[in-house]
Amino acid sequence: MAKVPKSAKRIYAGLKKETLAMHVSVTGLKNIGFIGRIKFWAVAIPAFRAAKKAEGCLFCETKMLNGYHHTLTVWVDKNSMMKYRSSTAHLNAMRIFPKIAYGKIYGWETSSFPTWNDALKFFNDYAREV
């Protein structure tokens, strides 16, 4: 279990431990070509900012590893993640995604904050291609 980030402590502390079922999502995307890289950043930055501000988002961070642009998010619950997934910023990114990148995603329920190492292990072992 990872240490709960300071930015999430207030929300995390208010959750009932017996019903705690956070949703974790880890994505990994690789750009397709130079133009794909430019378009990727044009939609990724607004989507990332929207995720950080989204209701129910406890943690949102990115990391580059093995050519993948990874995003790790931890949500109060799956419904919070689904609400963000249908947001304008995320839908704009998903609309252009097939033309600019390829990658994999994995999500799971947990009662503890994952470390980046945990998330990347799950990503490598279980992620599905999108």
Image (cartoon, rainbow, N blue to C red):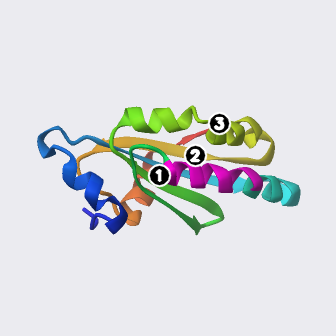
Label 1 with label 2: CB-CB less than 8 Å: yes
Q: Nearer the viewer, residue 124 or 55?
A: 55
Q: Whole-Å distance between the Cαs marked 1 and 2?
A: 8 Å
Q: Is residue 91 located in the magenta-colored stretch of the structure?
A: no
The residue at 38%/35% (across/down) is: 78
Q: Position of residue 52 (x, y in %)?
A: 50, 54
Above or below residue 6? Residue 28 is above
Taking the view exactly as shown, the residue that stands out farthest to the right is: 35
- Range drawn in magenta: 42-53
Of marks 3 and 1, the one in the foreground: 3
Whichever of callouts 1 and 2 sits on the residue coming sooner in the sequence is: 2
Q: Residue at x 48, y 46 (%)?
A: 54
Disc 3 target residue? 88
Could you say which disc has been placed on residue 104 in the image? 2
Is residue 127 visible in the rendered image? The answer is no
Residue 43 is covered by the magenta coloring: yes
Front one among 67 and 52: 52
Dominant secondary structure (helix, strand or loop) of the stretch shown in magenta: helix
**Given the image, on which type of amino acid does mark 3 rest?**
Thr
What is the secondary structure assignment of the residue under circle 3? helix
Report which residue position mark 1 lands on.
123
**Residue type, mark 1 in image:** Phe
Q: Secondary structure at mark 2?
A: strand
Q: Residue at x 21, y 46 (%)?
A: 15
